[in-house]
Each structure stands twice: as structure tokens, then as C-alpha cells.
Amino acid sequence: MAIQERINDYWSKRADEFGDARYTDMQSEKRENWTRLIEAHLPDKRPLRALDVGTGAGFFSFILRDLGCEVTGIDYSGEMLKNAHKNCERLGYTDIRFLQMDAQNLEFEDGSFDFIFTRNVTWTLPDPATAYAEMLRVLSPGGRLMNADANYAAGFKVMDEKGWTEKAAEQANTQYAFPARSLEMLRERNEIAKSLYIAEEQRPIWDLRVLINHGVEHFWLDLDVNANIFGRHAANENPKLSPEFVLVGQKKQEDR
């Protein structure tokens, strides 16, 4: 199986879990905290065209719509998008456009969006540098890209190499009822992570370098978003696994 389809198969199996979890999150403090953080970085332009890359079950598309954006959400997984549509019905959203699409090959014209949001997507991709290039291509001059992610691929690679996967599965079985937390699924996740070149990079330094090379000029960086969103600092027992960061970059304006 090609790596892209292997990745899709893994996340599609987790789609129902994510659908229910994100629906629950819409009723929680996480929604309010993410809303404040995103709102602080939206461009001033109105109306604001927003793209949610790797929308999953739609959580951030809903937040962007609540903030007044015209929202398009994309995901490679059709199963994830089924859950996004299901959550739209549950929550009463009727004007968000969801499309099945590869983040590494965006099917939009240049400059189609003023704000792009993505979370926990770049680490999962075979070629995240290409995804960044595509996001910046479809971002309008002066538009902003906001990426929340962590060095997960590196951390899961080390987890497997150190033999910690079995212990993690045992712990998960006592805390979660999701089949996706099984030993088989954790091993699959870690095997995928080991195959990704992002697992060998130091993040978010790598991200900054890529974005600078693609014409991003102004940056804002939070190296431990867990403290702001979840009210706690992330455990950092694995020295290669950084806490979740949020990186915001603004694309250069047209020639001034």
C-alpha cells in the first residue's frame, strides 16, 4: 500500500472517534480558548475567506464560521468528512463547504483565501514542505497561515525504537474505550511516523525555514499552546517530542 493511502486508512479508522470527540469539544472550554487564540490572529480584511486544512470532524471550521468567516474545510479522508457533515447537522451549520482534497495538491486558484488554519496535519504528510508551498500559493498577499502541530512523528518514532508502544497501549486501555488506541493501531501509527521525513527534523525550526523560503515575512510563535488551550504544560518526557506549538506567518504583500 502506498504511504499516502496507508495514512488515509489509519485516520479513516479513527474518524468516528474524532467525530464524537470534536462534537464534545464544541460544548467545552476548549472551544472558547481556541476561538480567542484564532480570533487574535485573523487578518483585518472583511469578508474573510478561510480554509481549514485537514478539517477532520469540522471543529475548527465551526469556530471560523462563528468568527464570521466564509469557510471551506478540506480533508483527504472521506470518512472524516462524513463526520464533519454529521456534526454540521448536530450543531446547525448550513453554509460551510467541505471538500475531499489532498493538502499537498490543493485544487484552488492562487490567492483564494485570506486565512488558512491547520492543526495536527503537517506531521502526518509524506511531503509537508509541499503542503506548505501549496497553502502559501492559495493564500492571498498579506494573508495569514496558522499551524498548530508538534514534533509527533519524531516522538512516535522514538517511542517505537525504545519499546514504549506496548506500555502506551496498556495505559490507553485503562483510559479510553476507542479501538484506535489498541496496540495494533498504535504500532501502525508509529510505523507510519518512522517512514516520514518530518520525523528527522527539528520543529518548529524546520517549519520556520520552509515558510521563510516561501515568502512569509511576519511570524508569531507559541511553543507550548497546551498551557493556553488546555490549562496545563505538556509533559516532555521524550526530548524529541516538543509540546504542541502554534506558528502564525503572514505572506508578503504584493510589491509595495
Image (cartoon, grey):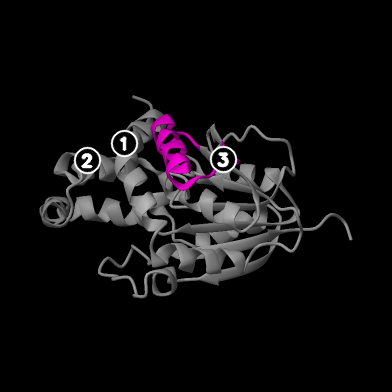
The disc placed on residue 113 is none
Residue at image point 65% right, 59% down: 212
Total marks placed: 3
Q: Which residue is mark 2?
A: 185
- In space, the residues marked 2 and 3 are separated at their CA atoms by 34 Å
Q: First in sequence, mark 1 or 3: give its number.
A: 1
In this rendering, position of residue 125 left or right of residue 37: left
Crowd class of label 2 (few under 14; some 14 to 19; many from 20; radius 10 Å): some
Circle 3 sits in a helix, a strand or a loop, which is it? loop
Q: What's the residue type where badge 2 is placed?
A: Met
Who is closer to the viewer here, 130 or 39?
39
Mark 2 or mark 3: name the one nearer the start of the chain.
Answer: 3
Can the viewer see residue 75 in this picture?
Answer: yes
Q: Nearer the viewer, residue 189 or 45?
A: 45
User: In the rendering, at what x and y percent does residue 24 appear?
Assistant: 35, 54
Reading the image, the residue beneath label 1 is 10
Q: Cα distance, mark 1 to mark 3?
A: 29 Å
Task: Tell me which segment is drawn in magenta.
Answer: 75-97
| In this view, the mark in front (1 or 3) | 3
Q: Main secondary structure of the magenta part?
A: helix
Residue displayed at 47% across by 46% down: 58
Q: Amino acid at mark 1?
A: Tyr
Q: Which is in the foreground here, disc 2 or disc 3?
A: 3
Label 1 secondary element: helix
Look at 33% across and 51% down and name the residue there: 21
Find the residue positioned furthest to the right. Answer: 256
Whether residue 204 appears in magenta in the rendering, the answer is: no
CB atoms of marks 2 and 1 within 8 Å: yes
Residue at label 3?
94
